[in-house]
Amino acid sequence: MNIGFLGAGPGVGALHLPTVRRLGEPWRVTHIADGGSGRARPLAEPLGASWSSGERELLADPGVDVVAICSPPQDHQRQVLAAVRAGKRVIFCEKPLAATREAATAVVNACKEAGTVLMVGTNHSHDPGWIKARGLLDQQAGPLQSISVTLALPPNARYHRMVSDAGPFQAPPRGRPDTRDPRIAAGVVKQLLTGLAIHDLPAVRNFAPVVERVEYARFVPPIGYAVGFRASGVDVQLALTMLPAGPDSLWRMTFATADLRMDLDYPPPFVHAGSGVVTTVRGDGSTTVYPPTPLDGYEAEWLYLEKLLAGGSPVDYDQVLADALYPIDVAEAAFAAMTAGDPS
């Protein structure tokens, strides 16, 4: 299958291209398009692939079977619909699929009506560590009481751009959002939830599908959030902080029942370091560690797409849509909680 990448940023250069090269058949990269940065050519030339700027040439390329949309999030909806109109039969779209409920619904419906294979690149949802954790939780007799997702990430200019160069909360050039303004702070939290928390919210939805209410939502400086909500009777806590310095990171999901605590520790983002590590602690104090597998989530998601194309599993469009809507619902509810009583 010949892949055309819309986007030539670090996610493509550091992750997807090495992944598909390592996996080999049936994958082959035949076209890379950037948004005007000029980064496509140095990525494409060593692969013998074509390069271009913008999406038109790639979508018109008959040698592209799979369109991999790895562009900025605000372009995803438009590019998915353009790929469907161009007759492309397979679309891999990085998260988020769309920014609003209406847009997500329109995208999924267009793919369903056209019979287009659609997969969203939520690598954590395919990580063998998550698959192991979900299986263990499904075996528990007692109900799940709480889920927490804790992120402590090193400095990364991508995250700073995410909250300073997008939407109605755009900051002055080379500036930062004035988060002293409650609505701007709420907008930053909303963007972070749909840009970072989205990695793990499909896993949360698996056990807590119905968002009932937001208990608290706060912006945490310099860039972060603390959000708590109730969903399907489960208490969910989301926390993010950007570390001021240093390479260390923490990306942990914690699940708790009356007799079990389970930690799922993912490897740092943007590296190939195997799967997540699962640690369980029982009420009697016994601890079990399930070590990482060599296969990581970035590889596993492409293997899953290969399975879809081989007919081994049909596209569950309802699940794709539900996973896209859940982060939007959480983000909008958090924004509403943070701006309640604001007359503007």
Image (spheres, grey):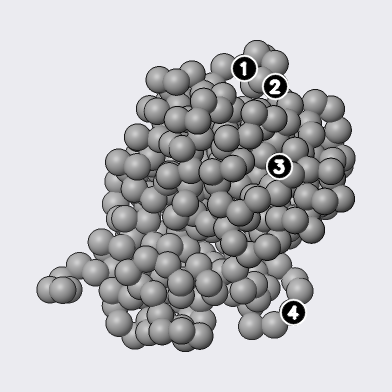
In the displayed structure image, the side of residue 283 where residue 211 appears, left or right: left
Residue furthest top as drawn: 311
Q: Position of residue 36 (x, y in %)?
A: 59, 62
Q: Which-is-in-front pick, marks 1 and 4?
A: 1
Determine whether label 1 and label 2 are within 8 Å by CB: yes
- Distance in Å between CA atoms under marks 2 and 3: 23 Å
Q: Residue at x 53, y 57 (%)?
A: 72
Q: Quadrant of the C terminus?
A: bottom left
Does dot 1 land on a helix, a strand or a loop?
A: loop
Q: List the residue tagged with mark 2.
A: 307
Q: Name the mark on residue 313.
A: 1
Front tag of 4 and 2: 2
Q: Residue at x 56, y 24 (%)?
A: 89
Number of labels in the image equals 4
- Determine the CA span between mark 1 and mark 4: 42 Å
Which residue carries the number 4 mark?
246
Image spot of residue 155 (x, y percent): 65, 76
Kind of residue at disc 1: Ser
**Label 2 crowd bin: few (<14), some (14–19), many (20+), radius 10 Å:** few
Q: Earlier in the sequence, mark 1 or mark 2?
A: 2
The type of residue carrying mark 4 is Gly
